[in-house]
Amino acid sequence: MVKFGGISGEQLRQFIEKIERLEQEKRDITDNIKDVFTDAKGQGYDVKIMRQLLKLRKMDADDRAEQEEVLDLYKAALGMIPSFEAQPAEEQEAA
Amino acid sequence: MVKFGGISGEQLRQFIEKIERLEQEKRDITDNIKDVFTDAKGQGYDVKIMRQLLKLRKMDADDRAEQEEVLDLYKAALGMIPSFEAQPAEEQEAA
Amino acid sequence: MVKFGGISGEQLRQFIEKIERLEQEKRDITDNIKDVFTDAKGQGYDVKIMRQLLKLRKMDADDRAEQEEVLDLYKAALGMIPSFEAQPAEEQEAA
Amino acid sequence: MVKFGGISGEQLRQFIEKIERLEQEKRDITDNIKDVFTDAKGQGYDVKIMRQLLKLRKMDADDRAEQEEVLDLYKAALGMIPSFEAQPAEEQEAA
DNA sequence: AACGTTGAAATAGTTC
DNA sequence: GAACTATTTCAACGTT
Protein backbone atom coordinates (compact mmCIF):
# COMPACT_ATOMS: atom_id res chain seq x y z
CA MET A 1 0.00 0.00 0.00
CA VAL A 2 1.44 3.31 -1.04
CA LYS A 3 0.94 6.11 1.36
CA PHE A 4 -0.05 9.50 0.20
CA GLY A 5 0.04 12.84 1.89
CA GLY A 6 0.49 13.95 5.44
CA ILE A 7 2.94 12.35 7.77
CA SER A 8 3.71 9.53 5.36
CA GLY A 9 5.28 11.79 2.80
CA GLU A 10 7.42 13.22 5.51
CA GLN A 11 8.51 9.77 6.57
CA LEU A 12 9.41 8.78 3.03
CA ARG A 13 11.39 11.93 2.62
CA GLN A 14 13.35 11.10 5.73
CA PHE A 15 14.16 7.64 4.46
CA ILE A 16 15.30 9.02 1.14
CA GLU A 17 17.43 11.71 2.65
CA LYS A 18 18.99 9.32 5.09
CA ILE A 19 20.01 7.08 2.23
CA GLU A 20 21.37 10.01 0.31
CA ARG A 21 23.47 10.98 3.28
CA LEU A 22 24.81 7.46 3.60
CA GLU A 23 25.60 7.29 -0.06
CA GLN A 24 27.49 10.54 0.21
CA GLU A 25 29.52 9.05 3.04
CA LYS A 26 30.27 6.09 0.86
CA ARG A 27 31.51 8.34 -1.90
CA ASP A 28 33.72 10.18 0.56
CA ILE A 29 35.30 6.95 1.67
CA THR A 30 35.86 5.90 -1.91
CA ASP A 31 37.70 9.16 -2.41
CA ASN A 32 39.75 8.54 0.69
CA ILE A 33 40.76 5.15 -0.63
CA LYS A 34 41.79 6.72 -3.89
CA ASP A 35 43.91 9.18 -1.95
CA VAL A 36 45.67 6.40 -0.09
CA PHE A 37 46.51 4.71 -3.37
CA THR A 38 47.81 7.98 -4.69
CA ASP A 39 49.97 8.44 -1.64
CA ALA A 40 51.31 4.93 -1.89
CA LYS A 41 52.09 5.45 -5.53
CA GLY A 42 53.92 8.61 -4.62
CA GLN A 43 56.00 6.50 -2.24
CA GLY A 44 56.94 4.22 -5.09
CA TYR A 45 54.50 1.39 -4.56
CA ASP A 46 52.80 -0.32 -7.45
CA VAL A 47 49.07 0.18 -7.22
CA LYS A 48 48.29 -2.86 -9.28
CA ILE A 49 50.25 -5.09 -6.96
CA MET A 50 48.66 -3.44 -3.97
CA ARG A 51 45.28 -4.37 -5.37
CA GLN A 52 46.42 -7.94 -5.73
CA LEU A 53 47.61 -7.96 -2.16
CA LEU A 54 44.27 -6.66 -0.99
CA LYS A 55 42.41 -9.20 -3.03
CA LEU A 56 44.49 -12.04 -1.67
CA ARG A 57 44.09 -10.86 1.89
CA LYS A 58 40.39 -10.60 1.39
CA MET A 59 40.17 -14.23 0.51
CA ASP A 60 39.96 -16.50 3.45
CA ALA A 61 41.10 -20.07 3.25
CA ASP A 62 37.87 -21.36 1.75
CA ASP A 63 37.78 -18.89 -1.05
CA ARG A 64 41.35 -19.57 -1.84
CA ALA A 65 40.74 -23.28 -2.16
CA GLU A 66 37.89 -22.55 -4.51
CA GLN A 67 40.05 -20.20 -6.49
CA GLU A 68 42.69 -22.84 -6.98
CA GLU A 69 40.04 -25.28 -7.97
CA VAL A 70 38.90 -22.91 -10.66
CA LEU A 71 42.46 -22.54 -11.77
CA ASP A 72 42.87 -26.26 -11.99
CA LEU A 73 39.72 -26.53 -13.97
CA TYR A 74 41.02 -23.96 -16.29
CA LYS A 75 44.25 -25.81 -16.76
CA ALA A 76 42.36 -29.00 -17.34
CA ALA A 77 40.13 -27.33 -19.87
CA LEU A 78 43.08 -25.87 -21.66
CA GLY A 79 45.47 -28.75 -21.52
CA MET A 80 43.15 -31.55 -22.37
CA ILE A 81 41.65 -30.09 -25.45
CA PRO A 82 43.92 -31.12 -28.28
CA SER A 83 42.78 -28.41 -30.60
CA PHE A 84 43.78 -25.76 -28.08
CA GLU A 85 47.31 -24.55 -28.14
CA ALA A 86 46.73 -21.09 -26.80
CA GLN A 87 48.24 -19.55 -29.91
CA PRO A 88 45.48 -17.28 -31.07
CA ALA A 89 46.73 -16.58 -34.54
CA GLU A 90 47.68 -19.97 -35.86
CA GLU A 91 45.73 -22.81 -37.35
CA GLN A 92 46.79 -26.38 -37.00
CA GLU A 93 45.68 -29.18 -39.25
CA ALA A 94 43.16 -31.58 -37.89
CA ALA A 95 44.72 -34.84 -36.76
CA MET B 1 29.74 -30.88 -16.70
CA VAL B 2 32.80 -29.86 -18.57
CA LYS B 3 33.39 -31.52 -21.83
CA PHE B 4 36.79 -32.75 -22.76
CA GLY B 5 38.26 -33.91 -26.01
CA GLY B 6 36.61 -35.20 -29.11
CA ILE B 7 33.76 -33.38 -30.67
CA SER B 8 33.21 -31.22 -27.60
CA GLY B 9 36.63 -29.65 -27.82
CA GLU B 10 35.84 -28.90 -31.42
CA GLN B 11 32.62 -27.22 -30.45
CA LEU B 12 34.29 -25.13 -27.80
CA ARG B 13 36.96 -24.14 -30.24
CA GLN B 14 34.31 -22.97 -32.64
CA PHE B 15 32.65 -20.83 -29.99
CA ILE B 16 35.97 -19.32 -29.03
CA GLU B 17 37.00 -18.60 -32.57
CA LYS B 18 33.65 -17.10 -33.39
CA ILE B 19 34.03 -14.72 -30.48
CA GLU B 20 37.54 -13.89 -31.54
CA ARG B 21 36.31 -13.07 -34.99
CA LEU B 22 33.59 -10.83 -33.61
CA GLU B 23 36.04 -9.07 -31.36
CA GLN B 24 38.26 -8.48 -34.34
CA GLU B 25 35.34 -6.91 -36.15
CA LYS B 26 34.78 -4.69 -33.19
CA ARG B 27 38.37 -3.56 -33.28
CA ASP B 28 38.08 -2.84 -36.98
CA ILE B 29 35.07 -0.66 -36.40
CA THR B 30 36.85 1.17 -33.63
CA ASP B 31 39.63 1.88 -36.10
CA ASN B 32 37.12 3.09 -38.65
CA ILE B 33 35.70 5.50 -36.14
CA LYS B 34 39.13 6.79 -35.42
CA ASP B 35 39.64 7.34 -39.12
CA VAL B 36 36.47 9.35 -39.39
CA PHE B 37 37.62 11.59 -36.58
CA THR B 38 40.95 12.02 -38.30
CA ASP B 39 39.23 12.95 -41.53
CA ALA B 40 36.99 15.43 -39.80
CA LYS B 41 39.95 16.96 -38.05
CA GLY B 42 41.63 17.31 -41.40
CA GLN B 43 38.59 19.22 -42.59
CA GLY B 44 38.98 21.64 -39.73
CA TYR B 45 36.46 20.28 -37.28
CA ASP B 46 37.14 20.18 -33.57
CA VAL B 47 37.23 16.57 -32.41
CA LYS B 48 36.48 17.47 -28.83
CA ILE B 49 33.32 19.26 -29.77
CA MET B 50 32.36 16.44 -32.06
CA ARG B 51 32.62 14.04 -29.16
CA GLN B 52 30.40 16.22 -27.07
CA LEU B 53 27.89 16.45 -29.87
CA LEU B 54 27.82 12.69 -30.07
CA LYS B 55 27.39 12.42 -26.35
CA LEU B 56 24.52 14.84 -26.37
CA ARG B 57 22.81 13.13 -29.25
CA LYS B 58 23.23 9.83 -27.52
CA MET B 59 21.64 11.19 -24.39
CA ASP B 60 18.82 12.54 -26.44
CA ALA B 61 18.20 9.35 -28.28
CA ASP B 62 18.81 6.72 -25.64
CA ASP B 63 17.81 8.20 -22.37
CA ARG B 64 14.75 10.15 -23.18
CA ALA B 65 12.40 7.21 -23.21
CA GLU B 66 13.78 5.84 -20.00
CA GLN B 67 13.84 9.20 -18.39
CA GLU B 68 10.22 9.80 -19.16
CA GLU B 69 9.35 6.41 -17.86
CA VAL B 70 11.09 7.16 -14.63
CA LEU B 71 9.46 10.52 -14.57
CA ASP B 72 6.02 9.07 -14.94
CA LEU B 73 6.59 6.68 -12.13
CA TYR B 74 7.99 9.45 -10.07
CA LYS B 75 5.01 11.61 -10.67
CA ALA B 76 2.65 8.81 -9.82
CA ALA B 77 4.50 7.86 -6.68
CA LEU B 78 5.35 11.26 -5.45
CA GLY B 79 3.33 13.95 -7.06
CA MET B 80 0.65 13.73 -4.47
CA ILE B 81 2.86 13.84 -1.46
CA PRO B 82 2.98 17.48 -0.50
CA SER B 83 6.08 17.35 1.61
CA PHE B 84 8.14 15.87 -1.16
CA GLU B 85 9.65 18.12 -3.73
CA ALA B 86 12.04 15.86 -5.59
CA GLN B 87 14.26 18.78 -6.51
CA PRO B 88 16.79 18.58 -3.72
CA ALA B 89 18.54 21.80 -4.46
CA GLU B 90 15.97 23.96 -6.10
CA GLU B 91 12.64 25.52 -5.34
CA GLN B 92 9.88 25.55 -7.82
CA GLU B 93 7.09 28.05 -7.95
CA ALA B 94 4.05 27.24 -5.91
CA ALA B 95 1.12 26.02 -7.96
CA MET C 1 63.39 -5.43 13.14
CA VAL C 2 62.95 -6.86 9.70
CA LYS C 3 65.62 -7.76 7.29
CA PHE C 4 63.82 -7.04 4.03
CA GLY C 5 63.09 -3.50 3.14
CA GLY C 6 62.84 -2.36 6.70
CA ILE C 7 60.67 0.68 6.94
CA SER C 8 59.27 0.12 3.46
CA GLY C 9 57.51 -3.09 4.32
CA GLU C 10 56.04 -1.44 7.35
CA GLN C 11 54.89 1.51 5.31
CA LEU C 12 53.25 -0.69 2.72
CA ARG C 13 51.50 -2.63 5.42
CA GLN C 14 50.12 0.58 6.82
CA PHE C 15 48.77 1.63 3.46
CA ILE C 16 47.15 -1.74 2.96
CA GLU C 17 45.61 -1.82 6.38
CA LYS C 18 44.33 1.69 6.04
CA ILE C 19 42.60 0.74 2.84
CA GLU C 20 41.18 -2.34 4.42
CA ARG C 21 39.77 -0.26 7.22
CA LEU C 22 38.20 2.16 4.78
CA GLU C 23 36.72 -0.68 2.78
CA GLN C 24 35.25 -2.08 5.94
CA GLU C 25 33.65 1.28 6.64
CA LYS C 26 32.21 1.24 3.18
CA ARG C 27 30.72 -2.16 3.76
CA ASP C 28 29.21 -0.96 7.00
CA ILE C 29 27.55 1.94 5.28
CA THR C 30 26.24 -0.34 2.57
CA ASP C 31 24.69 -2.43 5.29
CA ASN C 32 23.20 0.65 6.88
CA ILE C 33 21.61 1.58 3.59
CA LYS C 34 20.20 -1.87 3.29
CA ASP C 35 18.72 -1.51 6.74
CA VAL C 36 17.05 1.75 5.83
CA PHE C 37 15.45 0.10 2.82
CA THR C 38 14.30 -2.73 5.02
CA ASP C 39 12.77 -0.31 7.49
CA ALA C 40 11.04 1.60 4.74
CA LYS C 41 9.72 -1.60 3.28
CA GLY C 42 8.38 -2.50 6.71
CA GLN C 43 6.56 0.83 6.73
CA GLY C 44 4.83 -0.06 3.50
CA TYR C 45 7.01 1.78 1.01
CA ASP C 46 7.98 0.28 -2.32
CA VAL C 47 11.73 -0.20 -2.47
CA LYS C 48 11.81 -0.23 -6.22
CA ILE C 49 10.13 3.12 -6.43
CA MET C 50 12.40 4.47 -3.74
CA ARG C 51 15.38 3.48 -5.83
CA GLN C 52 13.98 5.29 -8.78
CA LEU C 53 13.35 8.34 -6.70
CA LEU C 54 16.94 8.28 -5.58
CA LYS C 55 18.10 7.86 -9.12
CA LEU C 56 16.05 10.78 -10.29
CA ARG C 57 17.17 13.02 -7.47
CA LYS C 58 20.76 12.08 -8.22
CA MET C 59 20.30 13.00 -11.85
CA ASP C 60 18.81 16.27 -10.79
CA ALA C 61 21.57 17.08 -8.41
CA ASP C 62 24.64 15.80 -10.18
CA ASP C 63 24.07 16.09 -13.84
CA ARG C 64 22.32 19.34 -14.19
CA ALA C 65 25.41 21.50 -14.09
CA GLU C 66 27.28 19.28 -16.48
CA GLN C 67 24.35 18.98 -18.76
CA GLU C 68 24.00 22.72 -19.04
CA GLU C 69 27.68 23.07 -19.69
CA VAL C 70 27.45 20.59 -22.51
CA LEU C 71 24.40 22.34 -23.75
CA ASP C 72 26.15 25.67 -23.87
CA LEU C 73 29.00 24.21 -25.81
CA TYR C 74 26.56 22.54 -28.07
CA LYS C 75 24.76 25.74 -28.74
CA ALA C 76 27.98 27.54 -29.42
CA ALA C 77 29.35 24.86 -31.67
CA LEU C 78 26.25 24.11 -33.53
CA GLY C 79 23.78 26.88 -33.24
CA MET C 80 25.15 28.60 -36.26
CA ILE C 81 25.10 25.63 -38.53
CA PRO C 82 21.69 25.64 -40.09
CA SER C 83 21.73 22.15 -41.44
CA PHE C 84 22.43 20.65 -38.08
CA GLU C 85 19.55 19.93 -35.79
CA ALA C 86 21.11 18.00 -32.91
CA GLN C 87 17.69 16.92 -31.71
CA PRO C 88 17.35 13.76 -33.74
CA ALA C 89 13.85 12.93 -32.63
CA GLU C 90 12.20 16.26 -31.97
CA GLU C 91 11.37 19.49 -33.64
CA GLN C 92 12.10 22.71 -31.93
CA GLU C 93 10.04 25.85 -32.24
CA ALA C 94 10.80 27.98 -35.21
CA ALA C 95 12.80 31.06 -34.33
CA MET D 1 25.09 34.62 -45.35
CA VAL D 2 27.21 33.22 -42.57
CA LYS D 3 30.42 31.48 -43.09
CA PHE D 4 29.53 28.49 -40.92
CA GLY D 5 26.45 27.43 -42.81
CA GLY D 6 25.81 25.56 -45.96
CA ILE D 7 28.04 22.77 -47.05
CA SER D 8 30.12 22.75 -43.86
CA GLY D 9 27.23 21.93 -41.63
CA GLU D 10 26.20 19.21 -43.99
CA GLN D 11 29.66 17.76 -43.94
CA LEU D 12 29.84 17.78 -40.17
CA ARG D 13 26.47 16.13 -39.97
CA GLN D 14 27.71 13.39 -42.26
CA PHE D 15 30.74 12.78 -40.10
CA ILE D 16 28.60 12.59 -36.99
CA GLU D 17 26.08 10.28 -38.50
CA LYS D 18 28.75 8.03 -39.92
CA ILE D 19 30.24 7.67 -36.47
CA GLU D 20 26.86 6.99 -34.99
CA ARG D 21 26.31 4.25 -37.52
CA LEU D 22 29.66 2.68 -36.72
CA GLU D 23 28.95 2.83 -33.02
CA GLN D 24 25.67 1.11 -33.61
CA GLU D 25 27.49 -1.64 -35.48
CA LYS D 26 29.81 -2.01 -32.55
CA ARG D 27 26.89 -2.42 -30.22
CA ASP D 28 25.39 -5.05 -32.50
CA ILE D 29 28.58 -7.03 -32.44
CA THR D 30 28.74 -6.80 -28.68
CA ASP D 31 25.26 -8.27 -28.60
CA ASN D 32 26.33 -11.03 -30.94
CA ILE D 33 29.19 -11.91 -28.66
CA LYS D 34 26.83 -12.07 -25.75
CA ASP D 35 24.64 -14.43 -27.75
CA VAL D 36 27.55 -16.73 -28.44
CA PHE D 37 28.35 -16.90 -24.76
CA THR D 38 24.74 -17.69 -24.04
CA ASP D 39 24.77 -20.47 -26.62
CA ALA D 40 27.95 -21.91 -25.21
CA LYS D 41 26.53 -21.81 -21.73
CA GLY D 42 23.49 -23.65 -23.03
CA GLN D 43 25.86 -26.33 -24.34
CA GLY D 44 27.32 -26.76 -20.89
CA TYR D 45 30.44 -24.65 -21.18
CA ASP D 46 31.61 -22.42 -18.38
CA VAL D 47 31.56 -18.82 -19.51
CA LYS D 48 34.12 -17.73 -16.98
CA ILE D 49 36.60 -20.28 -18.20
CA MET D 50 35.88 -19.32 -21.77
CA ARG D 51 36.79 -15.77 -20.92
CA GLN D 52 40.04 -16.96 -19.44
CA LEU D 53 40.77 -18.94 -22.56
CA LEU D 54 40.14 -15.91 -24.70
CA LYS D 55 42.33 -13.79 -22.52
CA LEU D 56 45.15 -16.28 -22.68
CA ARG D 57 44.88 -16.66 -26.41
CA LYS D 58 44.95 -12.93 -26.77
CA MET D 59 48.27 -12.78 -25.08
CA ASP D 60 51.12 -13.51 -27.36
CA ALA D 61 54.37 -14.83 -26.03
CA ASP D 62 55.70 -11.43 -25.09
CA ASP D 63 52.71 -10.47 -23.10
CA ARG D 64 52.72 -13.74 -21.30
CA ALA D 65 56.30 -13.30 -20.26
CA GLU D 66 55.42 -9.90 -18.91
CA GLN D 67 52.48 -11.36 -17.09
CA GLU D 68 54.65 -13.91 -15.36
CA GLU D 69 57.05 -11.19 -14.51
CA VAL D 70 54.26 -9.31 -12.82
CA LEU D 71 53.31 -12.45 -11.01
CA ASP D 72 56.84 -12.91 -9.81
CA LEU D 73 56.96 -9.37 -8.65
CA TYR D 74 53.77 -9.95 -6.77
CA LYS D 75 55.19 -13.01 -5.11
CA ALA D 76 58.29 -11.12 -4.24
CA ALA D 77 56.27 -8.29 -2.79
CA LEU D 78 54.21 -10.66 -0.79
CA GLY D 79 56.79 -13.15 0.31
CA MET D 80 59.51 -10.80 1.32
CA ILE D 81 57.50 -8.67 3.62
CA PRO D 82 57.55 -10.42 6.96
CA SER D 83 54.57 -8.58 8.27
CA PHE D 84 52.52 -9.94 5.43
CA GLU D 85 51.01 -13.32 5.86
CA ALA D 86 48.07 -12.93 3.55
CA GLN D 87 45.74 -14.42 6.12
CA PRO D 88 43.81 -11.36 7.16
CA ALA D 89 41.55 -13.10 9.59
CA GLU D 90 43.84 -15.55 11.21
CA GLU D 91 46.53 -15.40 13.79
CA GLN D 92 49.86 -16.75 12.83
CA GLU D 93 51.80 -18.86 15.18
CA ALA D 94 54.86 -17.32 16.67
CA ALA D 95 58.05 -18.45 14.99
C1' DA E 1 55.45 8.84 -22.95
C1' DA E 2 53.60 8.86 -18.22
C1' DC E 3 49.75 10.78 -16.06
C1' DG E 4 45.12 11.24 -14.62
C1' DT E 5 40.45 11.15 -16.51
C1' DT E 6 36.75 9.02 -18.45
C1' DG E 7 33.86 5.47 -20.57
C1' DA E 8 33.12 0.63 -21.44
C1' DA E 9 33.34 -4.22 -19.98
C1' DA E 10 33.17 -7.74 -16.47
C1' DT E 11 32.16 -9.38 -12.00
C1' DA E 12 29.71 -9.68 -7.82
C1' DG E 13 25.73 -9.25 -5.24
C1' DT E 14 20.63 -8.89 -4.70
C1' DT E 15 15.93 -9.63 -5.73
C1' DC E 16 12.14 -12.01 -7.42
C1' DG F 1 18.23 -19.56 -11.22
C1' DA F 2 17.45 -15.78 -14.10
C1' DA F 3 17.45 -10.74 -14.38
C1' DC F 4 18.71 -6.51 -12.59
C1' DT F 5 21.69 -3.44 -10.22
C1' DA F 6 25.93 -1.99 -8.14
C1' DT F 7 30.74 -2.17 -7.92
C1' DT F 8 35.10 -3.00 -9.65
C1' DT F 9 38.31 -3.43 -13.29
C1' DC F 10 40.20 -2.50 -17.68
C1' DA F 11 41.25 0.05 -21.71
C1' DA F 12 41.11 4.26 -24.52
C1' DC F 13 41.83 9.21 -24.67
C1' DG F 14 43.55 13.58 -24.11
C1' DT F 15 46.98 16.15 -21.45
C1' DT F 16 51.38 17.67 -19.87
Image (spheres, coloured by chain):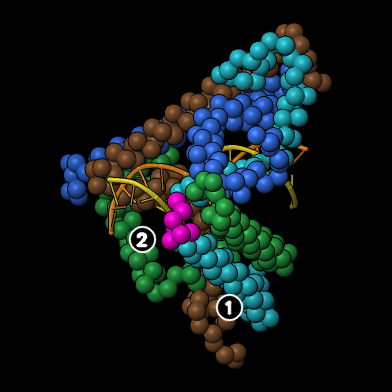
Chain colours: A brown, B cyan, C blue, D green, E orange, F yellow
Residue lying furthest front: D1
- The dot on residue D48 is none
Residue B37 within the magenta-colored segment of the rendering: no
Amino acid type at image mark 1: Ile
**Where is residue C11 shown, x and y percent of the image?**
25, 39
From the viewer's perspective, is D76 left or right of D90?
Answer: left
**Where is residue A31 shown, x and y percent of the image?**
41, 33
- The dot on residue A81 is 1
Decide: few, some or many residues near mark 1? Use Cα within 10 Å; few <14, some 14-19, many ≥20.
Answer: some
From the viewer's perspective, is B28 left or right of B11?
Answer: left
The span from disc 1 to disc 2 (Cα, nearest Å) is: 26 Å
Please, is residue A11 above or below residue D34 in the view?
above
Q: Which residues are magenta?
A: B40-47
**Dot 2 corresponds to which residue?**
D71
In front of the other: D49 or C53: C53
**Where is residue A89 shown, x and y percent of the image?**
50, 79
In front of the other: B94 or D78: B94
Residue lying furthest top: A6
Amino acid type at image mark 2: Leu
* Mark 1 residue element: loop
Instruction: Residue at 59%, 73% (x, y): give it.
Output: B21
Please, is residue A76 above or below residue C8 in the view?
below
Instruction: Residue at 72%, 34% (x, y): give it.
Output: B68
Instruction: Residue at 56%, 19% (x, y): give it.
Output: B89
* Mark 2 residue element: helix
Residue B46 within the magenta-colored segment of the rendering: yes
Please, is residue C33 above or below residue A33 in the view?
above
**Where is residue A84 shown, x and y percent of the image?**
55, 78
Residue lying furthest right: A1
